[in-house]
Image (cartoon, rainbow, N blue to C red):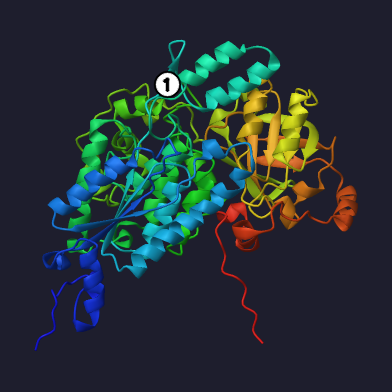
Amino acid sequence: MNEPGTSKPWRSREVTEGYLRGGQRALLKSAGLKKSDFSKPFIGIANSYNAMHAGHVHLNGLAELVAKGIEEAGGYPFEFGVIALCDGIAQGHDGMYYVLPSRECIADSIEIMAQAQRLDGLVMLGSCDKIIPGMLMALYRLNIPALLVTGGPMMPGKYNGESKAIYEIREAAGRVLAGTMSPEEFEQMEQSVTNGPGSCAMMGTANTMAIVAEVLGAALPGCATAHAVAENKAYIARQSGRRIVEMVREDLKPLDIITPRSFENAVRVAMAIGGSTNALLHIPAIAAEQGLSITPDDFERASRETPLIIKAKPSGPHTLWDVEQAGGVPVIVKELAPLLHMQERTALGTTLAESVAAVENRNPKVIRPIADAYAPQGSLAILRGSLAPDGCVVKQSAVVPAMRRHTGPARVFDSQEDAISAMREGRIRAGDVVVIRYEGPRGGPGMREMLAATAVLMGMGLGDQVALVTDGRFSGSTRGPCVGHVSPEAAAGGPIGLVEDGDLIRIDIDERRMDLLVDESVLAERRARFVPKPPKIQSGVLARYAALVSSADKGAILRPPAVTRG
């Protein structure tokens, strides 16, 4: 007697074929499958829908369209859930400790589902800051046919006739505290600053990483800036469902598409669009899943060689809707073509050159040609020096010229909350350098964003007169002379832990330097008695994270635990 089976060429046959798999087939039938479904490719839909998350609240509708596309192409869809934290909601309290660690949790959970259930392919739906990077990490770790459908930006809000993004209401809070904005005006702005579902309407981390995903070939062309409520987003979702079944049948895997040159393209595009400083954490973490090393020096080299062709909020006046109307990522790629590896492949299997051959720039004032770039260099600058021997990062495209070189006295705080209290009490003066430490990957733990602090500075009118230096990180919406990712961090014994109030700190973006102007003999005395503070949270998932996480200059990835051999 022949064993029942379908002779599937894909790995899902491991749960559908043979007498020994009768239990699995019975369970699948109880989940709604028919015998004829067992011969189809099994496609997972990793859906990060979240009812508390504006960027993800609409994803169930997109998941339904992905499922339809899968069914139309002859596959069988299996949807499962993925966590999704909103950075905006986690701002300013202990919730932010958990946001960056959620990236690894997302990647791990998708890996576990896809491997345990033997899925043949994956479509992942995510919109925001850590969800997209976590999904991309899983995509390359698994190396099964996979696509990302980014949920798309929200439509920009309007206040007093001007387009607004979420960071502007946070800065407005500082103006209320300073007495330059009334509570009534603040409430009106709060009602107007956002406009429906989607990622925040600016070039923050979410949209930076969505664009990176498309450039890497992990999402269909046009996906990144197709807005959450736009017709083309629905079309792309359905097409992604169809395409993933084709990819399974073609046996087209992520590592067949992605090469080291693809990552060079991604870094260069991130620099050209005014991308978030968080790209410095996420792109190396994604590349590490392939065993590739991308360092801060790679970002520095790309930024020096790549002109800035977009100035979207928070670095400039435009919104992501403006970028989409100008033509989105295909136009960005076409304008940057002389600087990119144009033979790299897209998710459709075509080359970048083929994918953009017919596109036209519909608004060169928004996406500028290289010859008319906003600046000769890209968005990020990597600084080194006695205060950051392993490097740190500043979004130079969002710094006013007067603050590109600055020397001032340190005002030192061991938490963001203490720094904000000092700002509100008027203890920070123009010219100061606010130092916030013990906020790094290990010391935080979790490397919180300092957006609450930068928003208060901006709102109080000090954002272009005070520098902020931290071993934590910044929101993609941060602007001003804000230097983050200082490495080594204070908790790892870095020089930032030795700084005392009144020490002079010199920042020189043009020379790529940041130095602590204290005599070495004095620093040696401080170093001899220095004992780093322990992580602020020492239990649960954050205790494990603090024990395993690498430094920021390595992407804050989790290292395998040390093995002790007897």
Which x, y percent locates residue 44?
A: 29, 58
Q: Is residue 101 above or below residue 411?
A: below
Most extreme residue toward the front is 30
| Residue at which label 1 appears | 157
Does the rendering let one see residue 367?
no
Residue 515 location, quadrant: top right
The N terminus lies in which quarter of the figure?
Answer: bottom left
Lateral position of residue 372 relative to residue 425, left or right: left
Counting other residues with Cα less than 10 Å from the Cα at mark 1, is it few (<14), some (14-19), or many (20 or more)?
Answer: many
Which x, y percent locates residue 563?
A: 61, 77
Lateral position of residue 90 relative to residue 354, left or right: right
Most extreme residue toward the bottom is 1
Along the line of sight, the residue nearer the viewer: 311 or 415: 415
- Residue at figure coordinates x 14%, y 64% from the top left: 34
Lateral position of residue 470 relative to residue 343, left or right: right
Amino acid type indicated by mark 1: Gly
Along the line of sight, the residue nearer the viewer: 332 or 538: 538
The number of callouts visible is 1
Q: Is residue 38 above or below residue 171?
A: below
Does the rendering let one see residue 135?
yes
Along the line of sight, the residue nearer the viewer: 31 or 207: 31
- Residue at figure coordinates x 24%, y 62% from the top left: 31
Which x, y percent locates residue 522?
A: 90, 48
Most extreme residue toward the left is 1
Q: Does dot 1 land on a helix, a strand or a loop?
A: strand
Q: Is residue 155 above or below residue 213?
A: above
Which x, y percent locates residue 362?
A: 27, 24
The C terminus lies in which quarter of the figure?
Answer: bottom right
- Residue at figure coordinates x 69%, y 38% from the top left: 469
Q: Is residue 543 above or below residue 344?
A: below
